[in-house]
Image: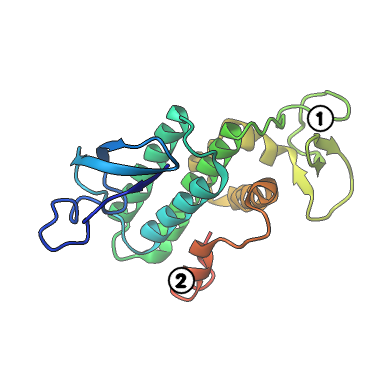
């Protein structure tokens, strides 16, 4: 929802230091229209320690949420998924402080997981465990073609719509943080799939978070 914090930019405003990104808050507001008025804000913990790659990644998931979910509707499970993702990003920053390349590598699994969770919240119901054509279980070594609103169909074609069974099984489990170095291709496939799946929800307008930080982190924005 959209909430207006009156006077928050004033020098003596108690809200000025509270209303910062990634600080968990308890809020009260009033109003019945589209624009609510903030009446109280209270921090329930310190802001998460997010910097550089972890911070830019957090802005990315913020923009995803704002762009695709319905306004003024409750999403309690998605909120928990969001908090878990932010916590994971902060942990990546702490564990690899000073090594942005390592942070970038470590945040990818959690971003991919959140994207899949967001798709689930949106009602995206593709079956990753069965072939949409035959109904047979997905075979790890088999290749499949992705068909929007249908699923994955066994095929020998190789193009941008091609995914392998081992990739689809990980998509179903969301176990991206358990992958070994030799399974990097699965993360790349997950990124390719979520971009295709989220495109109808995002439309043609590019994500501002990607545009904003591509100059700062060339080649690293998600």
Q: Quadrant of residue 131?
A: top right
Label total for image: 2
**Which element is circle 2 on?**
loop
Q: Which residue ends up furthest to the left in the rendered image?
A: 12
Left of 45 or right of it: where is 93? right
**Which element is circle 1 on?**
loop
Q: Residue at x 86, y 37 (%)?
A: 154
Could you tell me residue 165's position as x and y percent?
Answer: 74, 37
- Determine whether 9 is above or below 120 in the image: below
Could you tell me residue 189's position as x and y percent?
Answer: 66, 50
Q: Residue at x 43, y 28 (%)?
A: 76
Could you tell me residue 45's position as x and y percent?
Answer: 19, 40
Residue 217 bears which disc, if any? 2
- Determine whether 161 is above or below 25 in the image: below
Left of 204 or right of it: where is 5? left
Instruction: Please state, as top left, top right, bottom left or bottom right, where the N terminus lies in the image.
Output: top left
Q: Which of marks 1 and 2 is nearer the N terminus?
A: 1
Front residue (pair 45, 29): 29
Q: Which residue is drawn at 38% across and 38% down?
A: 84
How packed mark 2 is, by other alpha carbons closer than 10 Å (few <14, some 14-19, many 20 or more), is some
From the viewer's perspective, is the residue at label 1 or at label 2 nearer?
2
Front residue (pair 48, 169): 48
Q: Quadrant of residue 103?
A: bottom left
Front residue (pair 157, 139): 157
Residue 94 visible to the viewer: yes
List the residue tagged with mark 1. Answer: 131
């Amino acid at each position: 929802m959209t909430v207006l914090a009156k006077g928050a930019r004033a020098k003596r405003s108690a809200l000025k230091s509270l209303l910062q990104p990634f600080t968990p808050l308890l809020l009260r507001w009033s109003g019945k229209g589209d624009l609510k008025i903030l009446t109280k804000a209270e921090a329930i913990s310190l802001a998460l320690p997010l910097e550089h790659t972890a911070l830019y990644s957090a802005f990315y998931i913020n923009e995803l949420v704002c762009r695709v979910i319905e306004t003024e509707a409750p999403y309690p499970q998605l909120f928990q998924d969001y908090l878990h993702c932010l916590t994971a990003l902060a942990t990546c920053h702490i564990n690899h402080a000073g090594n942005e390349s390592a942070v970038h590598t470590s945040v990818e699994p959690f971003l991919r997981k959140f994207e899949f969770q967001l798709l689930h919240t949106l009602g995206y119901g593709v079956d990753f465990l069965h072939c949409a054509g035959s109904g047979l279980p997905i075979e790890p070594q088999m290749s499949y073609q992705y068909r929007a609103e249908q699923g994955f169909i066994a095929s020998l074609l190789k193009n941008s719509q091609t995914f392998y069974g081992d990739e689809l099984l990980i998509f179903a489990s969301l176990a991206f943080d358990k992958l070994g170095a030799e399974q990097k291709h699965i993360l790349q496939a997950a990124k390719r799939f979520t971009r295709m799946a989220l495109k109808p929800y995002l439309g043609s307008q590019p994500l501002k978070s990607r545009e904003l930080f591509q100059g700062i982190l060339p080649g690293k924005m998600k």
